[in-house]
Amino acid sequence: MRARVLFFGLLKDLVGRAAEERDFPEGADLRAVFDAYAAEHPRLREMAGSIVLARNQEFAAPGTALADGDEVAFLPPVSGGRDHDPIEISGPDGHYFALTRHAIDTRAVIARILTGAEGAVVTFEGTVRNNTRGRATRCLDYECYEGMALTMMARIGREIAAAHQVGRVAMVHRLGRMLIGETSVAVIVTAPHRRPAFEAALEGIDRLKKLVPIWKKEHFVDGEVWVEGEWDENLPVAR
C-alpha cells in the first residue's frame, strides 16, 4: 500500500525533502513508517522522543494502522503557499481562525468578531524580537502543516470559549518571513468582563505554542537554526 509522507521544520532538512510517496507492506502501522525512515536517517531515532506523528491531519500514536492513500506527517517540536490568503475558518459562532502570509491587522480582526455586548477585548500579539539570549537576530521564517494547523487552532479556540465566560475567540498566525518588530501571531478574546478575557487569551497562546504544528527558523547574523520548542506532554511521540 502507498502513503504520502510529509516532513516539516528541521526534519525536512534532515531527510533532504519535504514530501514523498512511498510503498509499505500490508498491515504496516505508523511505527513501521517511522522505522523505515529512521533506518535511513539514524538522527530520527535519536530524536524519537520529541517527534510527533500525524495520520490524515490528526495526531496519532505509533501503533495506529496505516491504510492505502493515507497522509503521514513527521512533526518536530513546535516552536511556536496557498493560492488564496488568508486560509481561514469561521462559522455561525463568530469565532475566527486564520493563517496568512501578510501583516496581521488586529484591528480588522477585532472588528470582525465584535457584537456590541463586550465589556473587554484582550489582544495578545507575539512579535519578532531582535535577539535570542543576546545573539542578534535578522529575521524569522515560519512554516506549518497548514490544514492540520488551522484545524487545531479552531479546536483550541472553541474549547477555550466553552471553558471560559467569554464571547468570541480569534487566532491568526503569520507564515513566511518576518522582520524585527513584526507580529507573528495574534490571539484575541472578547468577553463581558476583563478577567475571563485575559485568562482565555493566556491559555490560548500557551496551547497554540504546544499543539499547533508551526515551526520557526531563526536567522542570525552568524548563521541560522530551526528553533526547537516543546510538544504538549500528553501527545504520543514516535518512540
Image (cartoon, rainbow, N blue to C red):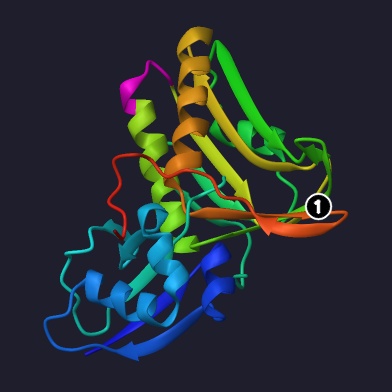
In the depicted structure, whether residue 42 falls above or below residue 189: below
Magenta span: predominant SS is loop
Percent from the top left, x then y, of residue 172?
Answer: 58, 44
Seen at 56% across and 50% down, the residue is: 228
Q: Magenta residues, as a range?
A: 162-166
Instruction: Locate residue 76 relative to residue 238 in the image: left or right.
Output: right
Residue 90 included in the magenta stretch of the image: no
Q: Secondary structure at mark 1?
A: strand
Seen at 59% across and 72% down, the residue is: 13
Residue bearing the label numbered 1: 139
Seen at 29% across and 40% down, the residue is: 234
Percent from the top left, x then y, of residue 121?
Answer: 59, 19
Given the image, on which type of amino acid does mark 1 rest?
A: Cys
Q: Observer-nearest residue: 90 or 122?
A: 122
Q: Is residue 75 visible?
A: yes
Q: Which quadrant of the figure contains the N terminus?
A: bottom left
